[in-house]
Image: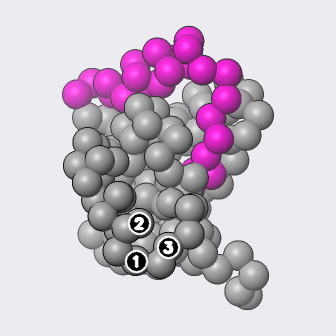
Amino acid sequence: MDFIEKEAIPFIEKNYSVNTERALYGHSYGGLFGAYALLHKPELFQKIMLGSPSLFYDNEVLFKDEAGFAQTHKDLAVQLLLTAGTEEGWAVEGNDKFAGVLKTHNYPSLKIDSIKIQGVGHLTGSPISQMLSFKWAFCKNEK
């Protein structure tokens, strides 16, 4: 997280023509990292896309992080997309649980979308999740 915030983003912004809207995509344990970023550095990314995030990790420690976040924050200004294949029940259940918990706090600026990708599992769903996530984040007007 420190590398992304203190080295990668400043380097990219200094050397390339970019806008100020930042997005983060992660799948599986990368999705777990994205959920961590959502709760620990919510100002760093405006759009976060979590593909089959491993929210079960360490006895669902991320849900404890979320409870701590909720105690100290009244808003979460992020657009969040959760994706999972219908053949990976653990990921669908984790996404539903995470979205449900976030929604209970009624963060005024939080927007949550979810896509269940029919008939795919963890590995076959990864490239589909990535494609759908990027379309969701950057191609809103495309049909």
Q: Mark 2 is on which residue type?
A: Glu
Identify residue for label 2. 13
Instruction: Point out the residue furthest to the top here.
Output: 71
Question: Which three-letter amino acid code belongs to the residue tagged 1?
Answer: Tyr
> Which is more toward the observer, 134 or 85?
134
Image height check: is 91 above or below 121?
above
Query: Residue 41 is drawn in which quadrant?
Result: top left
Q: In the rendered image, which quarter is residue 8 located in? A: bottom left
Please tell me which of labels 3 and 2 falls first in the chain.
2
Residue tagged by mark 1?
A: 16
User: Looking at the image, do the residues carrying marks 1 and 3 touch, with CB atoms under 8 Å apart?
Assistant: yes
- Residue found at x 46% / y 33%: 39
Q: 86 or 105, which lies in front?
A: 105
Disc 3, disc 2: CB below 8 Å?
A: yes
Q: Which residue is mark 3?
A: 18
SS of the residue under disc 1 = loop
Separation of marks 3 and 2 at Cα, in angstroms: 6 Å
Expressed as whole percent of the image width and height from the top left, the position of residue 91 reads 40, 49
Where does the magenta region start and end?
58-82
Judged left or right of residue 142, residue 29 is: left
Q: Position of residue 11 (x, y in %)?
A: 30, 64
